[in-house]
Image (cartoon, rainbow, N blue to C red):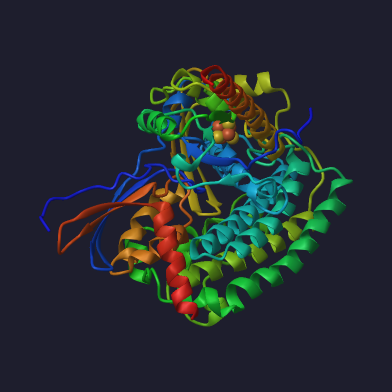
Amino acid sequence: MSKSTYKVPIGPIHPSLEEPMTFNFEISGEKIKSIDLAPGDNHRGIEFMGRNRNIIQIIYLAERICGICSASHPFAFCRAVENAAGISVPPRAEYIRVIIAELERIHSHILWAGVAAHELGFDSVLYLSWKVREEVMDILEILTGNRVNYGMFMIGGVRRDISKEQIPRIEKTIEYYKEAYQKLEDVFLQDPSIAIRTKNVGVLTYEEALNLASVGPTARASGVKKDVRQDQPYSAYADMDIKAITPDMFSGKVNGDVYDRIIVRVLEVKQSVEIIEYCLNHLPDGEILSEKKIAKLLGILKKAEGEGVGRHEAPRGEVIHYVKLGEGESPEVWKARAPTYNNLMSWVPMLQNQEVADIPIVVASIDPCIGCMDRATLVDANTYQKQVLTREELRKLSIEKTRRMMQ
Amino acid sequence: MKLDKYLDRSLWVFHLNTGSCNGCDIEIVALLTPRYDVERFGIKLVGSPKHADVLLVTGPVNRKMLPRLKLIYEQTPDPKAVIVVGTCGTSGGVFYDSYNIVGPVDKHIPVDVYVPGCPIRPEAIIDGVLKAWLKLERVRGASASSAEKVQKTSA
Ligand code: SF4
């Protein structure tokens, strides 16, 4: 064969759940030698648009940074603006915010669990998890009016109250998830078939996680006890004693592999249910907004000056929003840092020397939010042949490997 | 609306994300899972546009995805239907004034069905797919009858 490279141009866009992103892999035989990432396919210029809008309009823009984290971004953004303008939030609103944020964590983690099972070829588990997830979508719809992009957050509080009639319905959801949690634990943590495909795969060591500044479940699965809710308690979290969840709580040791990332997320579902239960039992009375009249609030924000930072532990890790308020309605600077931005680089050590068939599950294991691979270019280090694999083909490889290991 | 006449074959769908916020995309996936379960109607997400009857487009079309959108449209065999799912693909939505957005989708490819909403509900997507289905049946019916005509005249 000649040394010339060739490409197999099969669909640059994949049919799966996530957004586009390009990877370049160099492989030798079945082993991955080096990885290069090329993000940017999903760039929309959100922060630029924010500079032409007023603060309240930006909340809805922040919500649409990502449809899965549609409580996390507005949460962090509102906290940044409140921090800059010195607005305080009534306690009831803080509790409602936390309830929504934790409901979102449940939906996001279960969504992820389904995707991970799908990548391994267990589609029945995908269906089971998404069926369990519908319950949280229902309760979110009842509380906020929408299944995705809830529109709940407002500077200085929340837009909708939780009424007395709704509380029994939320309690029902809590009961439902307490039961469903057992099922999830059985399927994901007790069943050997998921363990054989994920143990010792895509390892990220404690040092690597620290060096790469990984956040969220990705870091916690490597033993880094990092959680904004624990390290810098805010909002209603400050009333609770929240501990960062690491895999040794379940299995007694930390490996930092994909299996550990599953443990952390499954345990966090349980933690979220407990947080919601606490919030519901301790829901204070009172106002839900510090300033009800939007026009007046805009006036206050127009006059406010200064900088503010808002942090929040999103399902995927710490999200930070920074705003600088100056003259006029729009912020002078608005910067959002999503957790996946930190976690992207942890793919590099995770994928080093792994098999091609493990790419889908390792990539999915950090729960990438803004990016995913639309295609991977494989360069064979021995023959210099270049091959473009679609995600479908990769998934096929992954499923074949699962079958091989099950035999 | 009588459906029995039309439901003569299943519909395969290719989903293309042109820079959306993911909100509409997860609702599309929710369609496949037990609550909505569109697979019972034969609607299936496929891995290549070459196998698809319907193109489901989400997102406001950013610069990097534009050539891919056009390519995928060309790769989908005729007769095809294009459905735009979500407000941001229909009109730009919240992203209307960005420097990197060149949409909406119908500026670049012909669109048959619009499903507005930010995000849309899964039921609305089913309704959109149904409308596309009717269009495809119409197109196919028309070409079948014209083929009959050609046969008759040549005979
Ligand atoms: S229409 Fe709204 S929810 Fe759907 S992808 Fe666009 S911005 Fe997201």
- Quarter of the picture holding the N terminus of chain A: bottom left
Q: Is residue B32 above or below residue B90?
A: below
Residue A46 located left or right of residue A286? left
Q: Horizontal and vertical percent for residue A279?
A: 74, 55
Q: Nearer the viewer, residue A237 or A378?
A: A378
* Residue B155, x across and y down, in percent: 54, 21
Q: Is residue B4 left or right of residue A326?
A: right
Q: Nearer the viewer, residue A283 or A111?
A: A111
**Vertical relation: B148 (above or below) A270:** above
Q: In the rendered image, is residue A86 in sight?
A: no
**Res A149 visible:** yes
Q: How many marks?
A: 0
- Vertical comparison of A379 with B95: above or below: below
Toward the left, the furthest residue is: A2
The answer to whether A148 appears left or right of A142 in the picture is left
| A311 w.r.t. A128: above or below | above
Task: Report whether A159 appears left or right of A110.
Answer: right
| Residue name at image x 54 percent, y 57 percent | A115
Measuring from the top left, give residue B139's x and y in whole percent.
Answer: 59, 24
Q: Quick one: which residue is furthest to the right in this view?
A: A165
Q: Provide residue B63's location: percent of width, then percent of height.
A: 36, 28
Q: Quadrant of residue A180?
A: bottom right
Which residue appears at 56% of the width and 64% of the height? A265
Which residue appears at 64% of the width and 41% of the height? B9
Near-viewer residue (B44 or A334): B44
Q: Identify which residue is drawn at 44% across, 59% down.
A: A395
- Ligand 1 visible in quadrant: top right
